[in-house]
Amino acid sequence: MTGLAAVSTVVQANGLRHRVLQFGPEQAPDLLVLPGITMPAAGVAFLATALCDNFRVHVPDLRGRGESDRAEPGGYTLPDYADDVAGLIEVLGLSRPTVLGHSLGARIAAAHAVRHGRSTTGAVVLVDPPVTGPGQLPYPTPRSSFLLQLEQARRGTTAAELRGHYPRWPVAELELRAQILTTCDEQAVMETYTCFETEDFLGLWDQLDQPALCIRGGDSPVVTSIDADELHRRNPRVPIVTVPDAGHMVPWDNLPGFLQVLAEHLPVSTRPS
């Protein structure tokens, strides 16, 4: 790991102001990391640092999180997020970046690949994408759990309290989350949660092609082994790889295992020379 400090950049894209954290040498291949539903960019810094020996890593605060702008009501759909990604790639001048998304970020990465095509991006890496949507089982973490975490953050949560939600996380990441969770706007989270059940992720999945990769946690309740079998049946073009000893929060739960899988299975054409 380089240990380089992040550079914070503010840009305008798709009509909103976005804060982006950037890690690693400018001459390295670009990697755009898209966080989850309640994860500001700072919460992914540990992963960006682990990857920035080989990549120039860019992590935006998604709209409604961190220091990025809040959207108007109704402005937290997958097309909104996907258009943000397209705008960020253009304004940051990224050169065919690999796009790696976790959870919500994985759904956004898939939506961007389908909505905007692959001419401006390299590989797409989906990490434990919620497969929920019309006609599917509900998201396994109830809405009330997200509301509880946001309420706890507003009154001042602690790493010990957060341990109940994330039992496998390192203490440092729990302490950081306790500090930054308040930057997630409740409207952004709740509208996005509703979209987990109303937007058709599987229709996007069916259209993905190489180079692409899906990584799931071996103990994930979000992409279970049954879900993985169904994803493979629907679209065998996309490899699905399992990280053992990890739940839905794959890199947080088992960072060495996640990095090993990424190094072994990321399409060769997207690896730095």
Image (spheres, rainbow, N blue to C red):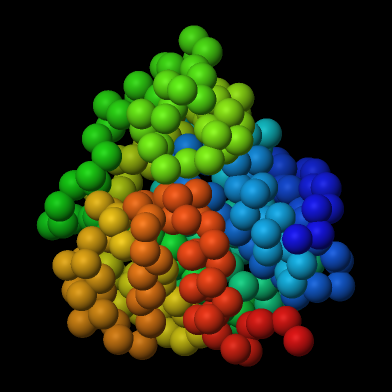
With respect to residue 17, does 234 lie above or below?
A: below
Residue drawn at 29 percent across, 56 percent down: 219
Residue drawn at 42 percent across, 43 percent down: 168
Q: Position of residue 57 (x, y in %)?
A: 71, 61
Q: Nearer the viewer, residue 114 or 1?
A: 1
Q: Position of residue 244 (x, y in %)?
A: 37, 64
Q: Nearer the viewer, residue 22 or 204?
A: 22
Determine the image quadrant of residue 25: bottom right
Q: Nearer the viewer, residue 77 or 183?
A: 183
Quarter of the figure with the C terminus: bottom right
Residue drawn at 86 percent across, 72 percent down: 27
With respect to residue 72, does 266 lie above or below?
A: below
Determine the image quadrant of residue 171: top right
Q: Position of residue 262 (x, y in %)?
A: 53, 73
With respect to residue 113, does 239 lie above or below?
A: below
Quarter of the figure with the N terminus: bottom right
Q: Is residue 46 left or right of residue 243?
A: right
With respect to residue 2, does 211 lie above or below?
A: below
Q: Is residue 241 left or right of residue 227?
A: right
Q: Is residue 71 visible?
A: no
Q: Position of residue 229 (x, y in %)?
A: 20, 75
